[in-house]
Structures are given as structure tokens and as C-alpha cells.
Image: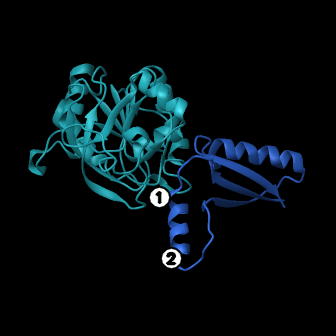
């Protein structure tokens, strides 16, 4: 599996996701600069975490209009999978590639800690490495991860199996306390209509190295490799 | 011509910053305070001199970049 990782000024998690992708696929991803207008041949496009354009105006708003995003949209329309993590998720919503928006955390504070996620739909290229209902532990690191959308959109996402992950307790239970940023219906990640675009606030790439004590995020990258190779 | 764009959260969208401001005002002793909402003000200098065309141009700016229609409303004021 060949991946292309897009970086914007202010992106800072590209090395983390490259390491996770390389661990899973054995191949070093290509790095693409936001001013580039062409993407290399790739089985997967990744928008990593960070603070693209300093989060000016709204998180992801400037990056969504970068030259490279035209190409990302064109590839996504052809069915090339796109994964947006954290700031990458914010960029995808601002670019109109995923529904909803990410607001300031309910606590108003930046949250950097491990959380549990419940895998809601395992029938996708991104989540086929997990079982539906499985709870995994991965870190979050964001100030604006409070997912919101109107009720009709939330109903549609749930009805169509487009909620990828929800914040939960260690056993997969949904509580207000575990919904760390106040997201609507505890949503941590969503798919587009064809389930070929995934955006999520938590960082599965930072839960892939045994040295860091937990490798629950590895399933996402292994799943992608098995689905796309 | 100058344009002022006021951007605010749609009704029903949670505004934790507005809430925090409300709490801070209450702790300063201000009473009788209902909901507090925080928005944004963007000032633009425009070369366009025709008011209608200017408004049209700023509306496009709002739709494409300045506001996020999922969560925000905007008002345009030409000065």
C-alpha cells in the first residue's frame, strides 16, 4: 500500500502517521506539500494532525482551500481513500468532504490524554481490522474536537452506518464523562457516503508503537493494508 | 468601500466560550444576565464602489471562506 501524506504549514503529526503507515505496509509514504497541484500515484491519501495555517479563522478553513485540496477532492471522487486525523478531520469538514463541523471542546481546554473509542462499523476499509463494538485505547490531542451537525444529519449518519467511532468507557459504554470534548452523540469519527473518506479526532497513529505501551491503533493501519493491497 | 461581516453561531449550536464569558461576568457580580454568545467581526476594504456588487462579492466570500454554513450565520454591513 502506497500512501501520500499531505502537509500544510503547521502540520506536525506527519512523522507519526508515516511511521505507523510504514510499520503496517513496509513502504515509506510520499510527502506532498500543500502548494503542490499534483499527487503521486497512491492507494491512500492522509491528512495528518497539527495546526494548519495556525488554525486561523477556523481550524482547517485555510487548508481546505490549499491548491493540493483540489487534487485530493478529485482523487476522492474517483474512490481513492482519504484519511483525515485530528486537524485533517477538521480540514475534511471545512472542504465539504465530510458532514458536520468541529467546535471548541466543551471544557474550553486543550485535551491531551488517552481515551477509549468504540468501533461502530467494522465493514469498511478503515475499520476492518477491528470487530464492531470493540473498545480501543488511543490518545486525543485537540482543543476543537467537539463534533456537531444538525439532528437530521446525525440521524442520517447513524442510519447509514457512517459513524466510525464513538468516545466510550473501557468496556465500550457511552457516558457523558467519557465523551471528553462534548461531541454530539459521542461521535469521534465519521465516514463519507461511500465510506472511502474517514475523519476522526483521535490519533490511532500514536497508539502503534509497543514502546508507548499500547498498540490499539495499529488495527486501523493493518486493516487498510489488508483492504488495499 | 468598507464591509463589516458579523459572524455568529447559529441558534442551537453550543457556544462554550460564550458560556465561560457569562460565568466570568456573573462572578464579577453582574446580575440579570441571560445567555451570552460570542461571535466574530471581520472588516474588509473593497475597491468596488457599487453597493450591490460589493454586497454580492462579500456574500461569496462568506459562503466560500469567512463563515462555515454548518455552524455559523453572517450579516454584511456596508460602510
Residue A54: numbered disc: 1
> Who's the residue at 56% across and 79% down the image?
B29
Q: Could you tell me if residue A214 is visible in this image?
A: yes
> Who's the residue at 27% across and 48% down the image?
A15
Which of labels 2 and 1 is toward the front?
2
Q: The blue chain is which one?
A: B
Q: Is residue A183 above or below residue B40?
A: above
Q: Colour of chain A?
A: cyan
Percent x, y of residue A94: 53, 41
Residue that label 2 marks: B27
Give the quadrant of the N terminus of chain A: top left
Secondary structure state at the residue bearing disc 2: helix
Classify residue B56 as left or right of residue B62.
right
Residue situated furthest front in the rendering: B32
Percent x, y of residue A7: 39, 46
Of residues B62 and A158, the one drawn nearer to the viewer in this rendering: A158
Residue situated furthest right in the rendering: B50
Badge 2: few (under 14), some or many (20 or more) residues near its Cα, within 10 Å?
few
Measure how far apart labels 2 and 1 are at the Cα level: 32 Å
Badge 1: few (under 14), some or many (20 or more) residues near its Cα, within 10 Å?
some
Give the quadrant of the C terminus of chain A: top left
Percent x, y of residue A114: 23, 51
Of residues A145 and B55, the one drawn nearer to the viewer in this rendering: A145
Percent x, y of residue A171: 18, 38
> Who's the residue at 48% across and 28% down the image?
A155
Q: Is residue B19 above or below residue A95?
A: below
Q: Are marks 2 and 1 in contact (CB under 8 Å)?
A: no
Residue situated furthest bottom in the rendering: B28
Q: Is residue B79 above or below residue A72?
A: below
Q: Could you tell me if residue A7 is visible in this image?
A: no
Amino acid at each position: 500500500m502506497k500512501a501520500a501524506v499531505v502537509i500544510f504549514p503547521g502540520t506536525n503529526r506527519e512523522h507519526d502517521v508515516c511511521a505507523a503507515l510504514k510499520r503496517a505496509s513496509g513502504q515509506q509514504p510520499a510527502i506532498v506539500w500543500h502548494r503542490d497541484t499534483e499527487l503521486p500515484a497512491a492507494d491512500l491519501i492522509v491528512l495528518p494532525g497539527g495546526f494548519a495555517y495556525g488554525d486561523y479563522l477556523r481550524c482547517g478553513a485555510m487548508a481546505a482551500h490549499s491548491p493540493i485540496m483540489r487534487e485530493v477532492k478529485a482523487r476522492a471522487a474517483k474512490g481513492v481513500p482519504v484519511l483525515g486525523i485530528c486537524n485533517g478531520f477538521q480540514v475534511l469538514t471545512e472542504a465539504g468532504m465530510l458532514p458536520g463541523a468541529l467546535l471548541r471542546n466543551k471544557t474550553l481546554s486543550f485535551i491531551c490524554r488517552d481515551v477509549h473509542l468504540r468501533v461502530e462499523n467494522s465493514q469498511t476499509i478503515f475499520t476492518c481490522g477491528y470487530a464492531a463494538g470493540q473498545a480501543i485505547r488511543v490518545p486525543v490531542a485537540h482543543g476543537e474536537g467537539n463534533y456537531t451537525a444538525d439532528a437530521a444529519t446525525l440521524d442520517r449518519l447513524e442510519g447509514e452506518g457512517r459513524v466510525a467511532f464513538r468516545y466510550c468507557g473501557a468496556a465500550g459504554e457511552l457516558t457523558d464523562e467519557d465523551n471528553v470534548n462534548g461531541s454530539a452523540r459521542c461521535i469521534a469519527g465519521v465516514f463519507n457516503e461511500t465510506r472511502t473518506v474517514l475523519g476522526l479526532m483521535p490519533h490511532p497513529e500514536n497508539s502503534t508503537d509497543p514502546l508507548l505501551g499500547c498498540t490499539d491503533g495499529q488495527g486501523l493501519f493493518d486493516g487498510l493494508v489488508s483492504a488495499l493491497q | 468601500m468598507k464591509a463589516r461581516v458579523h459572524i455568529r453561531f447559529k441558534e442551537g449550536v453550543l457556544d462554550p466560550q460564550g458560556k465561560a464569558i457569562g460565568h466570568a461576568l456573573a462572578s464579577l457580580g453582574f446580575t440579570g444576565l441571560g445567555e451570552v454568545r460570542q461571535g466574530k467581526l471581520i472588516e474588509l476594504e473593497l475597491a468596488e464602489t457599487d453597493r450591490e456588487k460589493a454586497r454580492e462579492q462579500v456574500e461569496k466570500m462568506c459562503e466560500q471562506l469567512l463563515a462555515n454554513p454548518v455552524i455559523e450565520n453572517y450579516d454584511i454591513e456596508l460602510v
